[in-house]
């Protein structure tokens, strides 16, 4: 037991795992036997992305997706380092046919979440080409065919979490009473709030980055609107006056405008959106068991997106579903559904049994967090059936990830299953499942969170516990010192 919760590796088979799910009241489907592609696995079915509505379409070769995973490891000028290239090579080796953005790339310098974030700016065009070609080359070498491989680039501005030169340099949509307090931000500091004029220039940067992505050979861009970063924060900007805040129309204006402009000016490029589809109030910074920050004084809670204003620990999917319909009507080809933020409610965003160094102990069995994400995605899919959707939060399922992935795709709960942390420790998992090979258990991500602890302490990210390449680096020793200091 860790945090009082049984570990996944302790369950002896799918039946025992299923019993634990029912003990927790979770209705996650678990297939008894995982099929290979040759046995007509639902995960080997192609997926049609786009349509007449989007102006172009693409047949993705299977139902596995690789989520964007940054590594805090680009060069200072935003170009890829050997670490960055290795990660993208591994994405290509995974066998997944949908590569959702590779990693967050900042559309302008002040929007980097760390000084080593990849840049999607003119100076890094050759770096972007190199990333894509490395991935596609590896995929071709392993699997031959790349005609059914869809590769995008995730575009971001880190907003409240910008640290382009190391120290925090937030640029926020509006002052948020709880997040300002959590970050030590002066609630009256107007200089950190975007002006409408600056936002117009930012929109131009997103469009320029999309043009660059197309030039670099990417087939789509993801206009990232998740995890507390800028375009996600705007969706809850009820307190912001003017064109880009207030009602739903105002709060979604910046996202809609960027999409409309990209669709008009780069018409052959597909557009995706990664969205935090629900949220909760921020959790308190602590090393104890996680608990929400006190929120009674801010009820009804007007600072969340996909949050019940009267009970802000509960999701309310009405607005997110309205947004998904809007995105579909704007010609968005597909969405990737995530939740919450790694900065203020990591147990919601990436369920883990071991917290990172700046995180709290899990306040619930992490399986509950997985179930919440899978269920929210199911409800979104049911409501907007004609928009292709990728699901998130599956890594914590570990040995039973393929059993659940197969079941949810077969049942039509989701179109494609995305992998985050699992692809860092075990890149070939999709290829192994499709080929009918048994899982390599010692490579399964056990959610040790070192890939988050490392960058929180200025060290490059990577799977230090399980990936021999990272285990051997001098950074592994530095990480050990941080963890046990
Ligand atoms: C080290 C690390 C880097 C990440 N980088 C990104 C990123 O660049 N863009 C993004 O949208 N999500 C990022 N995420 C979130 C993941 O894509 C994913 O949503 C999350 O890990 C939950 O999925 P999982 O349970 O499969 O790990 C990152 C997560 C980790 C652990
Ligand atoms: S460090 Fe490795 S095992 Fe730990 S959470 Fe990250 S990917 Fe998983």
Image (spheres, rainbow, N blue to C red):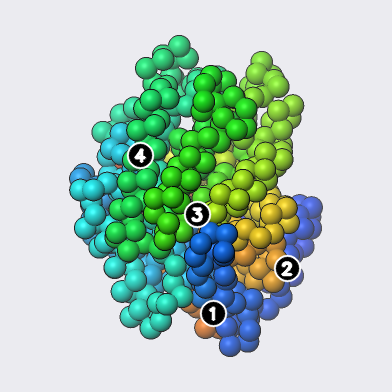
- The reply, left or right, for residue 165 in relation to residue 443 is left
Gap in angstroms between the C-alphas marked 3 and 4: 18 Å
Gap in angstroms between the C-alphas marked 2 and 3: 23 Å
- The reply, left or right, for residue 436 in relation to residue 364 is left
Q: Is residue 86 above or below residue 1?
A: below
Question: Judging from the image, what secondary structure is the residue with disc 2 in?
Answer: loop
Q: Which mark is residue 411?
A: 2
Q: Is residue 368 above or below residue 34?
A: above
Q: Nearer the viewer, mark 1 or mark 3?
A: 3
Tell me, yes or no, if residue 417 can be seen here: no
Q: Is residue 175 above or below residue 372?
A: above
Q: Which mark is residue 204?
A: 4
- The x, y position of residue 89, in whole percent, is 33, 67
| Circle nearer the N terminus (2, 3) | 3
Gap in angstroms between the C-alphas marked 2 and 1: 18 Å
In the picture of the structure, the residue carrying the numbered disc 3 is 272
Question: Judging from the image, what secondary structure is the residue with disc 4 in?
Answer: helix
Q: Nearer the viewer, mark 1 or mark 4?
A: 4
Gap in angstroms between the C-alphas marked 1 and 3: 25 Å
């Amino acid at each position: 037991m860790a945090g009082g919760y049984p570990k996944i590796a302790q369950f002896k088979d799918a039946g025992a795992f299923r019993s634990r799910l029912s003990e927790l009241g979770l209705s996650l489907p678990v297939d008894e036997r995982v099929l290979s592609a040759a046995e007509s696995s639902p995960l080997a079915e192609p997926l049609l992305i786009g349509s007449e509505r989007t102006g172009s379409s693409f047949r993705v070769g299977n139902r596995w997706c690789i989520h964007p995973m940054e590594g805090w490891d680009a060069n200072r000028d935003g170009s890829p380092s050997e670490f960055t290239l290795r990660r993208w090579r591994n994405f290509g080796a995974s066998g997944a046919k949908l590569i959702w953005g590779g990693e967050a790339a900042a559309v302008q310098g002040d929007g980097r979440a760390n000084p080593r974030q990849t840049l999607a700016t003119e100076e890094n065009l050759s770096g972007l080409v190199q990333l894509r070609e490395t991935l596609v080359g590896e995929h071709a070498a392993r699997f031959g065919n790349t005609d059914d491989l869809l590769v995008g680039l995730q575009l971001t501005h880190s907003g409240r979490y910008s640290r382009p030169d190391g120290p925090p340099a937030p640029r926020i949509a509006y002052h948020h009473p709880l997040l300002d307090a959590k970050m030590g931000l002066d609630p009256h500091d107007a200089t950190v709030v975007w002006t409408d004029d600056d936002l117009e220039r930012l929109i131009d940067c997103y469009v320029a980055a999309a043009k660059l992505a197309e030039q670099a050979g990417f087939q789509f861009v993801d206009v990232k609107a998740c995890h507390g970063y800028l375009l996600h924060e705007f969706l809850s900007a009820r307190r912001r006056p003017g064109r880009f805040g207030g009602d739903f129309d105002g709060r979604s204006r910046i996202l809609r405008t960027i999409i409309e402009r990209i669709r008009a000016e780069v018409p052959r490029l597909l557009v995706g959106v990664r969205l935090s589809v629900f949220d909760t109030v921020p959790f308190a910074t602590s090393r104890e068991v996680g608990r929400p920050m006190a929120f009674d004084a801010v009820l009804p809670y007007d600072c969340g997106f996909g949050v019940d204003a009267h009970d802000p620990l509960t999701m309310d999917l009405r607005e997110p579903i309205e947004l998904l319909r809007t995105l579909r009507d704007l010609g968005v080809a597909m969405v990737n559904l995530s939740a919450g933020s790694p900065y203020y409610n990591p147990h919601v965003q990436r369920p883990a049994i071991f917290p990172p160094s700046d995180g709290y102990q899990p306040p619930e069995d992490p399986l509950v967090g997985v179930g919440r994400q899978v269920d929210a995605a199911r409800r979104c899919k049911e409501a907007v059936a004609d928009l292709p959707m990728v699901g998130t939060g599956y890594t914590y399922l570990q040995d039973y990830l393929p059993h659940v992935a197969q079941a949810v795709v077969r049942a039509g709960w989701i179109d494609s299953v995305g992998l985050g942390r699992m692809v860092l420790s075990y890149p070939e998992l999709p290829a192994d499942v499709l080929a009918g090979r048994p899982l390599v258990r010692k490579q399964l991500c056990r959610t040790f969170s070192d890939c988050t602890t490392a960058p929180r302490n200025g060290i490059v990210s990577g799977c230090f516990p399980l990936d021999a390449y990272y285990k051997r680096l001098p950074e592994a020793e530095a990480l050990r010192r941080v963890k046990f200091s």
